[in-house]
Image: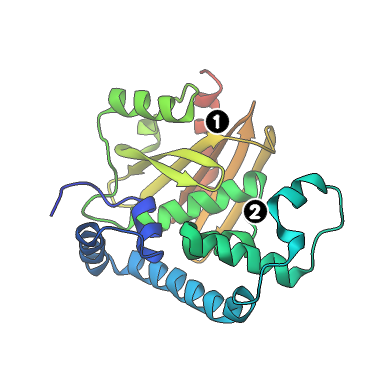
Amino acid sequence: MSNRPITEDDLHAYVDRALEPEREAEVGAYLEKHPDVARRIEAYSGERNLLRSALLPIAEEPLPPQLNLARMIESRRRRPSSWRWAIAAMLMISIGGLGGWVIRGATLAPAGGIAALAEEASDSYKVYASDRTRPVELRDIAELVQWVSNRLRQPVKLPDLTKSGYRFMGGRVVPTAHGPAAMFMYDDDRGDRLVVLTRPMTSDKNAAMAPHSGGDVAGLSWADDGTGYSLVGPRGLDALKPLADEIRKQAQTI
């Protein structure tokens, strides 16, 4: 068994059955120790199997001439083919290598702007904040800031929430549908954890602070000058708002 951390890419490849046997065993052992993550991965696997079963009859039909790649390029402005053939094409792509995860992304289009950022931050919180073994990948501040700045291709400032009663725990780079994002995690004397997610924005490059909540998680998301931020935690919005204001103030000094 290796000591490499289990990443989101590993989890997605596990769903698609695209891992080497040794790595698949490592991911399986990780899921046995992390029931919350295991439930999420089980749901993804269920979606993958349902979609494959539902679309299998279409995938077995012959590919129509309209979906010939050269012809499609020549007639880009033509009316799209019927939805049945479009779905079949997506299924064939998935079978060719990208697997059920591509189908899931194609049939369930991701949200955009800060709505997507809020969802990504909430997902990161649910996966990593509950992990008592390895919630973060790097704890050294200087090394982490350099790493995430290089991956995001822009300067990233680590928010300091010490005066607000939260200690910095560490962070990691997490994959999203809109590119890599930096995740920073904090905790307080009661063991409550917060997650700050930041990444470049392709839309909503300047957006007012907006609240969001779901289940036991609440948060606030915003964007300034092409960079988005989302603060997520188990506390109410009234308690999170001063923290979000402080993060926004610090980020504007980059």
**Does dot 1 land on a helix, a strand or a loop?**
helix
Which callout, 2 or 1, points at the residue further toward the start of the chain? Answer: 2
Q: Residues within 10 Å of mark 2 (few under 14, many from 20)?
A: few
Residue 172 placement: quadrant: top left
Residue at image x 39%, y 73%? 42
Residue where numbered disc 2 is placed: 111
At label 1, counting other C-alpha atoms closer than 10 Å, the crowd grade (few under 14, some 14-19, many 20 or more) is some
Question: Which residue in the protein does label 1 denote?
Answer: 248
Relative image position of residue 149 (x, y in whole percent): 43, 25
Image position, residue 233 (x, y; %): 44, 52
Residue 10 appears in the rendering: yes
Residue 243 appears in the rendering: no
| Left or right: 81 as drawn, with respect to 2 | right
Residue 132 vs 59, above or below: the answer is above
Residue 24: quadrant of the picture: bottom left
Give residue 146's quadrant in the image.
top left
The one of 178 and 72 positioned closer to us in this rendering: 72
Disc 1 marks a residue whose amino acid type is: Arg
Indicate the secondary structure of the residue bearing disc 2.
loop
Residue 114: x %, y % from top left: 63, 44
Q: Residue furthest top?
A: 253
Give left or right: position of 54 versus 182.
right
Mark 2 → mark 1, Cα distance in angstroms = 23 Å
From this view, report whether residue 183 is shown above or below residue 232: above
